[in-house]
Image: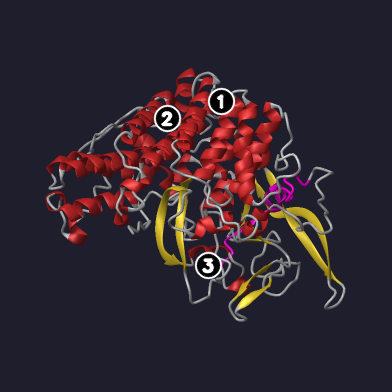
Amino acid sequence: MKKIFPYLLVGLAAASCKDSDDFLEPKTNALSEETVFTDSIRTMGFLSRIYSSSGYSFDKGRWNSHGNSEQATDDAEYSYSGAFQVAVMLYNGSVSPLAFQSNGLIADIWNIPYANIRRTNLFLEKLPTTPLSAPTQQRVAAEARFLRAWYYHHLLINYGGVPLIGDKVFEISDFPDYPRSSYADCVDYVVSELDAVAAVLPTVAGYSEQDYGRATRGAALALKARVLLYAASPLFNGGAETTDPALAAIVSYPTTSTTHWQRAADAALAVINSRQYSLHTDATRPGNGFYQVFLRRVNPEYIFAVNRGANKEFEIFYLPASRSGQSNSMPTQNLVDAFPMKNGKAITDPTSGYDPRNPYVNRDPRFGYSIIFNTSRYFLQSSGQQAEVLTYDGAPTDGFTAAGQRTGYYSRKMCDETLAANSPGNTERGWPLLRYAEVLLSYAEAINETGQTALAYDKLKEIRSRAGIDAGTNGMYGLTPNMTVAQMRAVIQNERRVELANEDHRWNDIRRWKIAVAVNNGFNKRMQITRGGTSPNFTYTYTVTNSVRQHVFRPNQYLMPITDSEIRKMPAMLQNPGY
């Protein structure tokens, strides 16, 4: 199969003129445009270079090899606390145009998309001169345009409207000074590009095995659904944090409209009705399909993914010290509380059966596949079998006072339960950038916001059924019948949080929903666990307390600041509100 590997990249927006083409850089590999684009293999290698950045935002080692936006949210606590760690800057409110300029890592929010947009434009410019056959040229041009739309969508969720540069390839002698396009124009451009390439790109079945992982028709349609969902959300649907009408049109639609939600619902439904994808299921045990999907490069649920060689990268990143992991991202009590019971009811429901004295019993099976909690079992290399992980305060190795433990929990989402970080084996793995469960949730969210709440139920039932939640005598999987739009909205947002945890969604979701000021200020919650009694009859007391780090989120942080140097290079651009 085609394996696509992410690399650490650098690039500048208007260094569209500076980044040149590191793939062609003569100082390092003596390749020129002519030698690359007169050779079929090198031409395809150049396209693979554009693919290689597609997972940059998802990458668990995105910043300093051990962090991404996950640790800036109410879902996770970071194992690092340095003031210049990017996740720390995001959660403590120290982001600014100058901070983005001085910290080159955080500037990847702007640099990597624009560097790859330029690469795409160069590829498209040179493609007609390459020795590739006409049918191949048509297909790879569509792949490249999909990737360009992919990088623009990352810019849109972080900045609102950005300069649209079309097919322009800037050279070192160019001094571009583009204004930012309106948010509406940016969305329309990306959607029109995705519509165009969806008509050309093959389905998954249309690719040969060695090309597995390339952009497909389904990927284009699924990305369109995401872009339109984001555009319909409160932050962009008339939600500009400014009274300046010119700036408001750049960072959002000027007025709120339900039609944006309907467009998003229609786009998600197009993916569903294509019948090209389905949730990965496995009846071996409740919810096992949810666990297994992340350990299968090839599965019916992944729409667009970064294929990886066999590895233990998530086991190394997430697991506790007793399993030789780095525990860089520790789940909060906030996230733990979001998981319902196995009957589908929220733990706050007095009829759910939740017992705060024994808080981990009879929970949604996704909980056990996502969270390592006190006394849960996970593979231990030294014994060659499953063994307890103890996270109570003072527990050796993995307790609150040991190894930087901050919340009482470790993550195991997407990890292979048969491997510790120090195990000799590896597992299959792909990074899920677009998967079918997200499309189902997007449809449910969008159709609910149009007022057609009844149409959201079946998609949530489908997800909860695969999760292993009990259907119940009424077949509702714990969902309350006849919910209002507001009630269903809360359920969908929570379901999205649980289903997509650790998959590079929470930071974007709490911003586009404009709930970050409410949920990402103050202190996250942790579980304080005290052990009593004597072996083998230990008892545990569970008390929810504040974590140790304060989060600060101001309204201006709903959008990221454009780097100060970029504004000075392109003064026609307006800075985002509040900066």
The amino acid type found where label 1 is placed reads Gly
| Mark sitting on residue 458 | none
Q: Tell me if residue 412 is in the magenta stretch.
A: no
Residue positioned 55% across, 21% down in the render: 258
Q: Is residue 73 visible?
A: no
When the figure is inspected, residue 464 is found, relative to residue 396, above or below; the finding is above
Disc 3 versus disc 1: nearer the observer: 3
Q: Which residue is mark 3?
A: 316
Disc 3 versus disc 2: nearer the observer: 3
Q: Which residues are magenta?
A: 326-347
Residues at marks 2 and 1, CA–CA distance in whole angstroms:
13 Å
**Colour treatment of the image:** secondary structure
Q: Where residue 172 sits: x, y (%)?
A: 21, 42
Q: Are marks 3 and 2 in contact (CB under 8 Å)?
A: no
Residue at the far right in the pictured view? 533
The amino acid type found where label 3 is placed reads Ile
Q: Where residue 500 sits: x, y (%)?
A: 57, 47
The amino acid type found where label 2 is placed reads Gly
Residues at marks 3 and 1, CA–CA distance in whole angstroms:
40 Å
* The one of 63 and 81 positioned closer to us in this rendering: 63
Q: Which residue is mark 1?
A: 239
| Mark sitting on residue 161 | 2
Task: Give the secondary structure at mark 3.
Answer: helix
When the figure is inspected, residue 511 is found, relative to residue 428, above or below; the finding is above
* The one of 243 and 380 positioned closer to us in this rendering: 380
